[in-house]
Amino acid sequence: MSHPNILVTQQNGILGIEISRREKKNAITSDMYRAMSAALSRARDDSHVRVVLLRGQDDMFTAGNDLADFLQRKVGDPSAAIPFLHLIAAFEKPIVAAVAGNAVGIGTTMLLHCDLVYAADNTRFQLPFVNLALCPEGGSSLLLPRVAGYQRAAELLMLGEPFDATTAREAGFVNRVLAPGELMAAAMEAAQKLAARPAGSLAVTKALLKRPPDRSAIEAIDEEVIFFGDLVAAPAAKEIFAAFLEKRAPDPDKIHKT
């Protein structure tokens, strides 16, 4: 499903999803959610896609839900945001996000499901749900305390005040803060590096990182051993080891086999 405000590109193993509705501060409508869901489904099912790069522009990410569109939905009607959130939460391939300008509501909560988040120093995050007489969404009541700690998450979610990229980095869900002019290049560089890594190994690593945090270290060790044994016998590892011994570059087709 294509949409004029959701620009989808695909090149060199990277599927780009750009929110582009500048006249409305990139506010997201139901149809835009459906378009992003379609893009994520395409990326999930296409073996040539190894990484997703989610972005706005270098001065604007998204103002969150389009309120006019949001208020048109009748009580009880399913929200198009839910399938999008389910897809991004369960996505097995790496997701890199490049964020600048406003990142309001779901513009912040969706980042908690991304693997690498790069933010420009002009980013203005906000979780305004309580201010709107609502509650947290997008899994943020679970995920934000996990990365930020309870008190910091409570401050961001209960007061609902804007905060900057440095605060987001201290809260644990932004990897790097950059100048706006450096943002997209840094995010693309990270996406390119991930796209060059063995696809099967990345998928297993992400799956292990997403496991419930309450398991013991022994359980984690034993689970990793099983996957490690499978991977070391797979074509990708064999090719990388052979290339190292033969002092040559690995064959990309072999290292991306899952």
Image (spheres, rainbow, N blue to C red):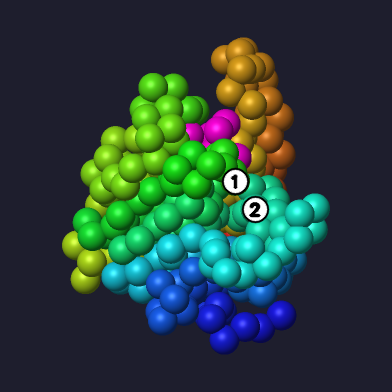
How far, Cα to Cα, is label 2 from label 1? 6 Å
Q: Are marks 2 and 1 in contact (CB under 8 Å)?
A: yes
Query: In the rendered structure, which segment of residues is drawn in magenta?
Result: 139-144
Can I make out residue 53 in this image? no
Q: Quadrant of residue 208?
A: top right
> What residue type is disc 2 on?
Leu
Query: Residue 130's x, y, as percent?
Result: 49, 39
Tell which circle, 2 or 1, labels the residue nearer the N-terminal end. Answer: 2
**In the shown orientation, is residue 117 left or right of residue 34?**
left
Query: Residue 240's x, y, as percent?
Result: 53, 53
Name the residue at 54% across, 67% down: 66
Which residue is denoted by mark 2 in the rendering? 85
Secondary structure, magenta segment, majority class = helix
**In the shown orientation, is residue 215 left or right of residue 110?**
right
Query: Residue 74's x, y, as percent?
Result: 76, 61
Regarding mark 2 in the picture, which secondary structure is present there?
helix
Regarding mark 1 in the picture, which secondary structure is present there?
loop
Tell me the quadrant of the picture where the N terminus can be found: bottom right
Residue closest to the eye, 153 or 11: 153
> What residue type is disc 1 on?
Gly
Name the residue at 57% across, 69% down: 68
Examine the rendered structure and indicate whether residue 148 appears above or below residue 244.
Answer: above
- Mark 1 residue crowding within 10 angstroms, few (<14) / some (14–19) / many (20+): many
Which residue is denoted by mark 1 in the rendering? 138
